[in-house]
Image (cartoon, helix red, strand yellow):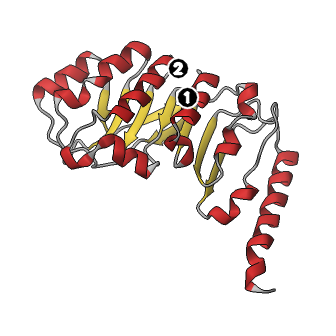
Amino acid sequence: MARRDLPQFHTGILRQFRDLLLRSLGTPLVDMGLNVENARYAVAVPHFEANTLPNLKVVDVNGFGCSRFLLPSPLANRPPLRRVALGRELCESPRHLATLLRACPSITDLDISSARELSRAFLNIADNSITDDALLGCLACIARTSPLLEILRLGDRGTLHSPSLDDLAFIADLKRGCPRLRHVGLGVSPYCSKVAEHVLKFVQDLEVDIYAASFLVDGYSYDLF
């Protein structure tokens, strides 16, 4: 087989696997991950019809073409999503994120830290500030659409070392829209981060944890950092 035929060959295999998966699992499918690192294979990303995955609760999608996995077909069925980890194109489009959150208010655990470009822009690591307008707009959208949210992950381990009170002020607004919120992951490590006492008191009064921790979701333990 000529080298130039390999992408088409692999794309065909992926399509066959997708069809087999849907025939085998279909409606009972609860947990699904999808990672497409090569843009050549984006064409093979599943485009599910409405009602195909009505019981989906845990989704981890990242890479090229993933917007057609979640948008818009399954959203017409509003699956009972609980834990969602998003990356790249889904996170980098505020419209896509808003569409997903509006359709699935059942989300309790949202992870957008894997979208590297988004995470770096939002956290604005250069000056240790998380008051970027794009982030504030994203958080406002989350507060409006995710009343059951308990866990929100915005940064990777070690990205934010010494958060100030101004850095964390947004959590108060977020908590008003998401009263069950108990963890906001900002990359703050309890071992290498220095957090002032008054800053800790602020988040403690809100009953929100900013340190690394593990949580149980539907019986599964997820290590946030």
The residue located at (35%, 45%) in the rendering is 121
The residue closer to the viewer here, 67 or 113, is 67
Q: Residues within 10 Å of mark 2 (few under 14, many from 20)?
A: many
Is residue 128 something that shows in the picture?
yes
Q: Position of residue 133 (x, y in %)?
A: 34, 32
Q: Disc 2 and disc 1: Cα gap in Å?
A: 8 Å
Viewer-nearest residue: 73 or 148: 73
Closer-to-camera residue (47/61): 47
Q: Residue furthest left?
A: 197
**Dots 2 and 1: beta carbons under 8 Å?**
yes
* Residue behind mark 2: 145
Q: Is residue 225 visible?
A: no
**Relative to 191, residue 54 above or below:** above
| Left-right relation of 159 to 216 | left
Q: Nearer the viewer, residue 131 or 202?
A: 131
Horizontal arrangement in the rendering, residue 42 relative to residue 101 (left or right): right
The residue labelled by disc 1 is: 98
For label 1, count other residues whose C-alpha is less than 10 Å away and answer few (under 14), some (14-19) or many (20+). Answer: some
Helix, strand or loop status at disc 1 = helix
Residue under the image location 52 percent in, 49 percent down: 88
Q: Position of residue 13 (x, y in %)?
A: 81, 65
Q: Quadrant of residue 38?
A: bottom right
Amino acid tagged 1: Ala
